[in-house]
Amino acid sequence: MDSTTMLAVAVAAVAVVALVWFMLSRRRSEQLRQRFGPEYDHILQTEGTARRAERELEARAKRVEALHIRPLSPEDAGRFDRGWRAVQTRFVDDPKGAVAEADRLVGEVMSERGYPVGDFEQRVADVSVDHPDVVMNYRAAREIALLHSRGQASTEDLRQAMVHYRALFRDLLETEAPAATDSPVHTTPERRRP
């Protein structure tokens, strides 16, 4: 084989390796995008590059895999569901207290399922692995709770926080919400509650 042929074979081999690497990388990206949904885009924006974002998401998945997350027993799910209904009822008379209680109840469900409940950002990262479609709700609810702590949240903001907490709560509970009792929160008794 002459040097021109060897060079052509080497170039072709490098091109094939590059193409395979590109296809595998693209497939990996697509799998992560499908698994993490909107969280993929959030982390991409936060991290700045797809490579760093994907490393972060893979690290999250590996961490959560080691946590041994478990489903709730039917008894625990029922107990938490009753607790949520009580929180929803409380909203009419005490929106601020209900939001604080909703946050506490979400943390309790997370703990019972096996998620560590220390640092908020770590909780969000851990929950995003198995509940990527609602983790943005958790962030939004937390932001409203922080606004409330500074005296900057209206009753409508608190209602929206309850809606966000409810979405995460229901997903963590892994049960279907009853339609008649799980309508959006409103601030007057004539309207439906969370």
Image: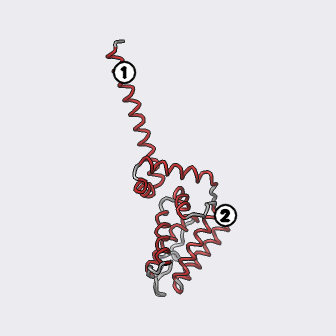
Residue 156 x/y as whole percent: 43, 80
**Residue lying at 36% horizontally and 17% vertically, measured from the top left:** 6
Mark toward the viewer: 1 or 2 = 1
Looking at marks 1 and 2 on the same chain, the residue that comes earlier in the sequence is marked by 1
* Farthest-out residue, left: 4
Which residue is identified by label 2? 73
- Please state which of residues 38 and 122 is positioned toward the viewer in this rendering: 122
**Residue lying at 46% horizontally and 84% vertically, measured from the top left:** 187
Name the element at disc 1: helix
Which residue is identified by label 1? 9
**Residue lying at 42% horizontally and 36% vertically, measured from the top left:** 21
Q: Are marks 1 and 2 in contact (CB under 8 Å)?
A: no
Left or right: 122 as drawn, with respect to 75: left
Q: Quadrant of residue 7?
A: top left
Residue 149 x/y as whole percent: 50, 78
Which amino acid type corresponds to the residue marked 1 in the rendered image? Val
Which amino acid type corresponds to the residue marked 2 in the rendered image? Ser
